[in-house]
Image (cartoon, rainbow, N blue to C red):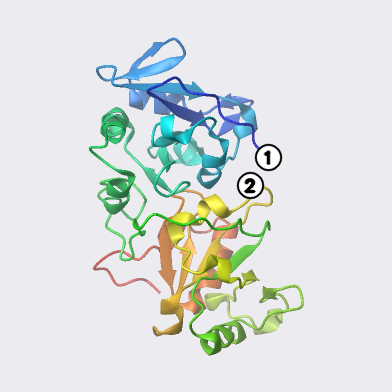
Amino acid sequence: MTFPEFPQPEPGEVLLVGTSYQDGKAQWDDLLDGIGGRREDGALVLGDARVRLRLAEDPAWDFLHGGNVSALVPGDRASLPPVVVLADMTVAYGGEGPLLVDLVAIPGRGVRVPSARLGEILAVLQTGVLTFDDLVREMDIYGMYQGGRGRPAFPAPTAPAPRDFPALPSTEGVLLVRTSFDDEDGWRALLDELGGVDKDGWVGSDLDPDEIDVDEYPLTALVVDDPAFEGLEAGSVPALVPPKDHAPMVVLADARTFTDPGRPLISVDLYDTPGQPAVLPCRMVGSMACNLEIANMDFVDFVAEEGVQPWW
């Protein structure tokens, strides 16, 4: 799947892009009502005119993911605002606030903000009083900036700025990416625990259905074992996932996978709050992937809350 480039915003404008459509029409009316403001020359002017949202609507952007946004922004990045705002499926069907996608510090990661505060937050982002890292540090387990539903036990990393990584493989399956290369024996033990790697590079692809524990469903994933991804962190992942054959989830095996009990892995949200991590014991990641695939649970159901014992 390919997406057309976004329109070029006027100086000082921020793009508000519709990415959820019904009968060819962007599903953002409730969001626009919640944002407020006045229409002026195709833009939505908020507050005392410090913020102008340029509305961008094209059914070709239906199901566009936040991580793929930065590749569609035209022109010189230095002259653009620090974020793009998405009115996505979560806005259309969940009633949550719009998704702000980082274009500067770690392109592709996202944070949600309350609709009524969008103008205020964009104004201080544009002046540099607030940074995207500030938004990430203050988001709740649902990815909402200053939300009141608990702080994540494993917050998304904010610094240092990422280096360039290659694109991840294009696949409709889960990706298991090795990001730490100091313990070869530990890596081999992890792969063995997941059922071993087949000739095509997949773990868990040849399991006996009669031996599957449905409470701890095995992980099926394409293995990415490439030193080019050493040090990759959750926030940088969404921008590396190709829009074609978009992976449902990316799982990282970092240094703690080989030192901490339970071989914890980092699952990365690619949809609701791109770049948000959920750190889970190895035995739980397959169940997470299965439940997300059948829409039985949401990503947030696996995000550990600070000070609260996880259900698993």
Relative image position of residue 152 (x, y in whole percent): 31, 61
Residue 192 or 204: which is nearer the viewer? 192
- Mark 2 vs 1, N-terminal side: 1
Label 2 – label 1 distance at C-alpha: 7 Å
Above or below, comparing residue 41 to residue 59 in the picture: above
Could you tell whether 187 is left or right of 234 in the image?
A: right
Location of the N terminus by quadrant is: top right
* Residue 3 found in image quarter: top right
Q: Secondary structure at mark 2?
A: loop
Q: Are marks 2 and 1 in contact (CB under 8 Å)?
A: yes
Relative image position of residue 75 (x, y in whole percent): 52, 30
Above or below, comparing residue 60 to residue 306 in the picture: above
- Identify the residue at image location x=35%, y=17%: 45
Q: Is residue 80 visible?
A: no
- Identify the residue at image location x=49%, y=32%: 76
Location of the C terminus by quadrant is: bottom left
Question: Dot 2, crowdedness within 10 Å: few (<14), some or many (≥20)?
Answer: many
Relative image position of residue 177 (x, y in whole percent): 56, 69
Residue ranking furthest to the top: 41
Which residue is labeled 1 in the image? 2
Inspect the image, locate mark 1, and give the three-letter code of the amino acid beneath it: Thr
* Residue 305 found in image quarter: bottom left
Inspect the image, locate mark 2, and give the three-letter code of the amino acid beneath it: Pro
Which residue is labeled 2 in the image? 243
Residue 199 or 230: which is nearer the viewer? 230
Could you tell whether 260 is left or right of 286 in the image?
A: left
- Identify the residue at image location x=37%, y=23%: 12
Q: Secondary structure at mark 1?
A: loop
Tag of residue 119: none
